[in-house]
Amino acid sequence: MMSPEIETIRQQLPGWLEASLPCVGRGKVASYIPELSKAPHDALGITLMNPQGESVTAGDCGLRFTMQSISKVFTLILALMDNGEDAVFSKVGMEPTGDNFNSMLKLELVRPGIPFNPMINAGAITVSSLIRGESPNEKSDRILQFLKELAGNTDLEYDLGVYRSESDTGNLNRSIAFFLKENGVLSGDIEKVLEVYFLHCSIAVDCADLARMALVLACNGSDPLTGKALIPRRYVQIAKTFMTTCGMYNASGEFAIQVGLPAKSGVSGGILTFVPGRYGIGVVGPALNNKGNSYAGVHLLQSISREMDWSIF
Ligand code: DON
């Protein structure tokens, strides 16, 4: 038998999803990575999972999409596990930017020219360079293995079509990376750093994969379904703080007020979020608002969080 709260969610979820569906018409599927423009504009799906492994789903929760910026949470955690806090935060800051996710504005404006935080592109590219491994292949493999373990899914793989599409067109990210090299933040072969970054952005998942990864964060780094300790609690605490302050980019303040949960979005329309100790949540809705977050996905999370009184604030 399901626990009472998740039973309430199971009954209410179809109605909440229905009420959010009209929002898809107000959003736009990302097209600056050409392959992403093939995503279904009107899709919306969600999976919630509790520490007992009970899950509730609605809508297009089986849709496969790429993690994009959601992967930044986990590369940060892996870089912290590989290098420790001091080394990571000598290369990337801890502050929100108020700028777009792919902005390089402040790299020139604010000394010492290190990225403001690991959730924006400049910061995440820097973090990719800190992953341990002799080659881009070895680094990428370690990231993929880590995500497979967190998702409890050995079948996770790259969407190489999306990877190539981004790699062929990623001039802005290339510019950011070269700027970072000029500022002494990156060193060595920039293309090798970008290969690792583009590859982890292209890991394909569905809502259940995101919900299970989020559940590990919700449980302070332990997988409640296997009992394995996967992430040190301190690094979950750091990731959680960045998700709350920078995870929805320059809409993080609004999301904190309207939803009140740590979250991370991606331009494919995915959102990973969680209710501490209680639920891991994965959402997808490829039509985005002007800040690059899923239009309907944010609306849906707002309804659920308000109704269930989940804000952590
Ligand atoms: O670097 C990029 O532009 C993409 N691979 C990821 C950006 C992203 O997901 C921003 N999210 N809202």
Image: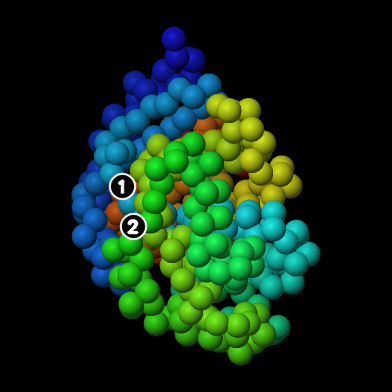
Q: Are marks 2 and 1 in contact (CB under 8 Å)?
A: yes
Which residue lies at the image location 46% right of the left edge and 71% below the top edge? Answer: 195
Mark 2 beta carbon near ligand 1 (under 8 Å): no
Q: Which mark is residue 222?
A: none
Q: Which mark is residue 159?
A: 2
Which residue lies at the image location 41% right of the left edge and 18% below the top edge? Answer: 7
Q: Amino acid at mark 2?
A: Asp
Which residue lies at the image location 66% right of the left edge and 44% below the top edge? Answer: 231
Q: Is residue 127 left or right of residue 27?
A: right
| Labels 2 and 1: the sequence-earlier one | 1
Task: Tell me where residue 136 appears, x and y as whole percent.
Answer: 52, 68
Task: Tell me where residue 30 appears, x and y as whole percent.
Answer: 30, 64
Q: Amino acid at mark 1?
A: Arg
Tell me how far mark 2 sits from mark 1, CA to CA.
10 Å
Task: Tell me where residue 310 appears, x and y as whole percent.
Answer: 53, 34
Query: In the rendered image, which residue does mark 1 sit on?
Result: 64
Q: Is residue 178 left or right of residue 167?
A: right
Q: Secondary structure at mark 2?
A: loop
Q: Please tell me in which quadrant of the rendered image residue 229 appears.
A: top right
Spot the residue most to the top.
1
Q: Quadrant of the C terminus?
A: top right
Q: Quadrant of the N terminus?
A: top left
Residue 110's place in the image compared with 197, above or below, is below
Q: Secondary structure at mark 1?
A: loop
The answer to whether residue 117 is seen in the rendering is no
Of residues 312 and 216, the one drawn nearer to the viewer in this rendering: 216
* Figure colour scheme: rainbow
Of residues 183 and 8, the one drawn nearer to the viewer in this rendering: 183
